[in-house]
Image (cartoon, rainbow, N blue to C red):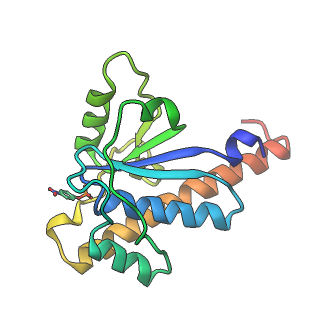
Amino acid sequence: MSAYLRAMKILMVCHGNFCRSPLAQGILEDKTKKAGLTWEVDSAGTKAYRPGLPPHPLSQEVAKRYGIDITNKKGRNFRKEDIDYFDKIYVMDEENYNEVKRICGKNRSTEKVDFLLNEIYPGENESVPDPWFGDEEDFDAAFKLIEKACERIVVSLLKEDDERANGVAF
Ligand code: 4NP
């Protein structure tokens, strides 16, 4: 595997960096670590109301239920420099997508930005519903959706790498 693929830098973005993106960060970190990849995974909010503070208690709880610890994550705002630093930026919904583009400005290349759920529903620009006003069930549903997309990210990459190694034409 190329050094680039082995050590990619991925940013997960939602509105508050409180409910969805810390879950996405924790889940992808867990999956990449288990796959032997040394990816840097981070998360940010287009409007992080609680910079420096941990994720929503229900995000922490649902993650813990599935064996993932996100208690040490700290909220932060998305900054325009993130577009240069990260290899790929996944957003949870259309508002996040538009805000990331607005913050980066017209001159920045934003082709690195994509909807997370395009990994499982290609080209559909589907949203991960925000559990912010919901209950435990909504947080659980968000976890499962995000988990499926993160699984696809890792599986597609490993499959692509395997095909390259075996000389399969694309
Ligand atoms: P998130 O959810 O974007 O998944 O973190 C929200 C968290 C906080 C707020 C809105 C959405 N808020 O308005 O404080």
Q: How many marks?
A: 0
Q: Position of residue 13 (x, y in %)?
A: 36, 48
Pick out the residue farthest to the bottom: 65
Between residue 71 and residue 46, name the one nearer to us: 71
Quadrant of ligand 1: it is bottom left
Place residue 20 in its image quadrant: bottom left
Pick out the residue farthest to the top: 107
Pick out the residue farthest to the front: 52
Lateral position of residue 14 relative to residue 169, left or right: left
Between residue 77 and residue 143, name the one nearer to us: 77
- At 47% across and 64% down in the image, what residue appears? 26
Position of residue 133 relative to residue 41, above or below, is below
- At 22% across and 66% down in the image, what residue appears? 131
Looking at the rendering, in which quadrant would you find the C terminus? top right
- At 25% across and 79% down in the image, what residue appears? 137
- At 36% across and 30% down in the image, what residue appears? 80
Between residue 111 and residue 38, name the one nearer to us: 38
Q: Position of residue 105 (x, y in %)?
A: 31, 22
Position of residue 34 relative to residue 159, above or below, is below
Lateral position of residue 63 relative to residue 102, left or right: right
Q: Position of residue 147 (x, y in %)?
A: 46, 66
Q: Position of residue 129 (x, y in %)?
A: 25, 60
Place residue 9 in its image quadrant: top right
Lateral position of residue 44 relative to residue 7, left or right: left
Between residue 96 and residue 149, name the one nearer to us: 96
Pick out the residue farthest to the left: 133
